[in-house]
Amino acid sequence: MLKVWGRRNSINVQKVMWAVGELGLEHEHIDAGGSFGKLDSEEFERLNPNRRVPVIEDDGVAIWESHAIVRYLAAKHGSGSLWAEDPATRAAADMWMDWTATDLQNVFIGLFWNLYRTPEPQRNWNLIRQGIARSAILFRLLDRHLEGRRFIAGDTFTMGDIPAGAQLYRYYELEIDRPALLNVEAWYMRLQEREAYRTHVMVPFDELKGKLSF
Ligand SMILES: N[C@@H](CCC(=O)N[C@@H](CS)C(=O)NCC(=O)O)C(=O)O
């Protein structure tokens, strides 16, 4: 059976669990990382030499990197849904997944760590202000892309919605100034109609507050 390793309050694990939920896959979930530890074991290093979560084990292979896992699950189980059959639609999903990895999540995670995970006395407000401003620029760009589209790659939900969609809950939960993002907000509402999003992404993360390490 599919095994998913990783603590449920990790945004990267949440992407995988969201995909598993969308696809209705039977699986075993193993808490790992953070306060659960386990990443230092030799068993885990054999699965992922980077000693990070998420990792999946499926049919005798181990796969790490959240977006590679989402693509794998979509390709294997989500033909015509998460895995768009039209190559151009799939490329659009892929583009925004890569953009999230290199741009959006990169910037937003920096903000999240500087603002939320850093204990108050150690916070660097210059970095925080920069993170808020850069996140706003990237979310505005996404907002322009979503004009006239219901989902990232077009009319239907695909794997392309998962990485950027996973950032939204924390972006909207943080007490920060945000620009008006009408299309992003409408998309966020659409994602919230999905049970797998509510179950796996919209989960409290207060145990991460002020914690730079576990
Ligand atoms: N690029 C990787 C990042 C993986 C990563 O940084 N995982 C974090 C959790 S979000 C981790 O394993 N941290 C150590 C820990 O949780 O103990 C991915 O997308 O899967």
Image (spheres, helix red, strand yellow):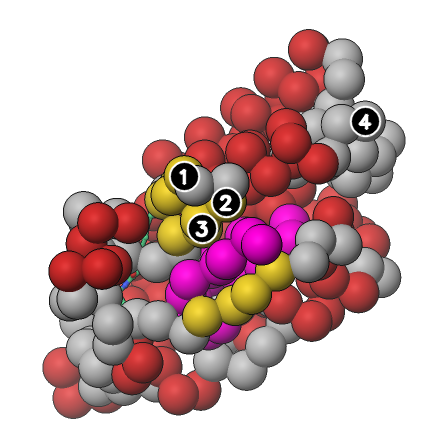
Indicate the quadrant where residue 88 lies: top right
- Is residue 62 rendered to the left or right of residue 18? left
Q: Measure the alpha-carbon separation of dots 4 and 2.
A: 21 Å
Q: Measure the alpha-carbon separation of dots 4 and 3.
A: 23 Å
Mark with earlier residue (4, 2): 2
Q: What residue is at 30 percent from the left and 71 percent from the top?
A: 33
- Residue 8 on image: x %, y %: 49, 72
Mark 2 residue CB less than 8 A from any atom of ligand 1: no
Mark 3, residue position: 56
Mark with earlier residue (1, 3): 3
Q: Amino acid at mark 4?
A: Gly
Q: Nearer the viewer, mark 4 or mark 1?
A: 1
Magenta stretch containing residue 16, yes or no? Answer: yes
Q: Is residue 92 above or below residue 72?
A: above
- Residue 92 on image: x %, y %: 63, 21
Q: Amino acid at mark 2?
A: Asp
Mark 1 near mark 2, Cβ–Cβ under 8 Å? yes
Q: Which mark is residue 58?
A: 2
Q: What residue is at 42 percent from the left and 74 percent from the top?
A: 31
Mark 1, residue position: 61
Q: Secondary structure at mark 4?
A: loop
Mark with earlier residue (4, 1): 1
Mark 1 near mark 3, Cβ–Cβ under 8 Å? no
| Residue 179 appears in the rendering | no
The span shown in magenta is 1-20
Mark 2 near mark 3, Cβ–Cβ under 8 Å? yes
Q: Is residue 156 above or below residue 167?
A: above
Q: Measure the alpha-carbon separation of dots 1 and 2.
A: 5 Å
Q: Is residue 120 above or below residue 127?
A: below
